[in-house]
Image (cartoon, rainbow, N blue to C red):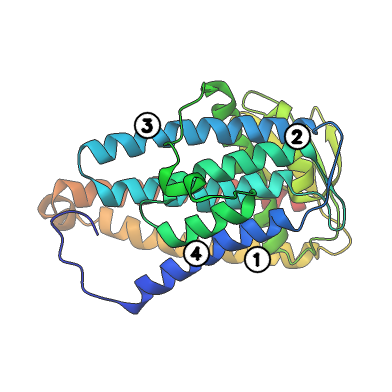
Amino acid sequence: APAGNDLLFDEKLCEQGRNFSNKIWNAFRLLKGLDVVEGKSLPEHLLATEWLTTRISLTIAEVQDHFSKFRISDALLSIYNLVWDDFCSWYLELIKPPYGEPIDRKTMDATVTIFEDLLKLLHPFMPFLTEEIWHWIRERSNASEAICLASWPEQKPNNASLLQEFIPFQQAVAEIRTIRKNNQIPQREGLELKIQQGAGYPQALESAMIKLTNLSSVERVEEKVPNAFGFVIGTTSFFIPFGAAVDVDAEKAKIQKEVDHLNGFLKSVRGKLSNERFVQNAPDNVVSMERKKESDALAKLQVLEAKLAELG
C-alpha cells in the first residue's frame, strides 16, 4: 500500500500475491526440469542475458532509491514488474529450448545466477518462498549459506543501447501476436514476415523474434505488400501476407465495421464542436479533448481506409 493511504482489505490482493508466488515457483520448476548439455549459447540467449542483467542493475538502483526514501510499495512494484514481465514473460521465453530439447550449460548457469539475484531482491518481501527456492536451486549444505545472510545483489555494467533495441523488438512481437490472436491463426502455423526496413528495426534480435512468434520466413522488400496484415514501428513497415486460413472478405467486413463506427463517433464529436454554445461555454480542456478525439479518429480512419484500398 502506498504510504499515507488507507487500504481496505480485499481478498483479490491475496490472490495477486498467490499468483505471483505461483509464477516464481513455476519459473523455478521450468529451470529444474531442463536437461543441461555442454555447448555454446545461441546469440539470442547471450543478448537476452545481457539485456536482463542491465534491467536488473537499473532496478537495483531504483529499489535502493525507494528504500532510502521509505517508498516501500514503489520498491516492491519495481521488483514485481522485473520478475513478472522481464524475467518470466520475456527472458525465460527467449532462453527456453523447444519442448524436449536440452539447454546449454552456459545459459543455464547465467540464468541461475540471475534467478538468485531476483530472489535476493524479493527476500525482504517474500522471505519464506525465496529461502525455500534458494536452497533448491543450488546445493547449499549449511545454515551460513541461507539467503537471509547473503549479500545484496551488485549492479553490473549497463548496456543502454541494447535496452533501446529491445523496445521495438517487444513491440514487433506484440503486434505479430495480436495479428495471430485477432485472426485465430494457430500458433503452430508458421507466418511469413515481409520487412520494408527503416530506422528502428531490431536487426540483432531478429532470430529471437522468429522464435517467439513462430515465423516460417523473413524477407526484405522494397515496396508495400498487398493483401497483408501490416504495422509500423519507427520507420520500418512489417507485413504478414494473408494465408489460406484468412478470409479476405471477412477481413474487409471487419475493417468496414470499424470505419462505420469511427464515422459515427466522428459525427458525434463534430456535432459538439460545431455547436457555438458548447465551444464558448465548455472549459478549455474539455474543448481541447474533443478536438483531440476528432484528430485521432481522422488518423485511424486514414489507416483503415488505406487497408481497405489494399484489399481491393
Q: Residue at x 58, y 62 (%)?
A: 25
Q: Indicate which disc, 1 or 3, sits on the residue closer to the N terminus.
A: 3
**Mark 1 or mark 4: whose residue is earlier in sequence:** 4
Sequence-wise, which precedes: disc 1 or disc 2? Answer: 2
Q: Please give the count of numbered marks on the rendered protein.
A: 4
Q: Which mark is residue 21?
A: 4
User: Which residue corresponds to the image point at 54% horizontal and 64% vertical from the top-left?
Assistant: 260
Specify whether 307 is left or right of 270: right
Q: Is residue 65 left or right of residue 41?
A: left
| Alpha carbon separation for disc pair 4 and 2 | 27 Å
Q: Residue furthest front?
A: 142
> Could you say which quadrant of the image residue 112 lies in?
top right
**Mark 1 and mark 4 residues within 8 Å of each other at the beta carbon:** no
CA separation, marks 1 and 4? 40 Å
Outermost residue toward the bottom? 11
Instruction: Name which residue type carries label 3.
Output: Ala
Three-letter amino acid code at the position of disc 1: Lys
Mark 3 to mark 2: distance in Å? 27 Å
Which residue occupies 77% across, 30% down? 43
CA gap, disc 1 and disc 3: 47 Å
Q: What's the mark number on residue 254?
A: 1
Name of the residue lying farthest toward the left:
281
As drawn, the label of residue 106 is 2
Ranked by sequence position, the earlier of labels 4 and 2 is 4
Residue type indicated by callout 2: Lys
Compute the Cα span from label 1 to label 2: 48 Å
| The one of 177 and 94 positioned closer to us in this rendering | 94
Picture coordinates of residue 200 (x, y %)? 62, 27
Q: Helix, strand or loop at disc 3?
A: helix
At mark 1, the secondary structure is helix
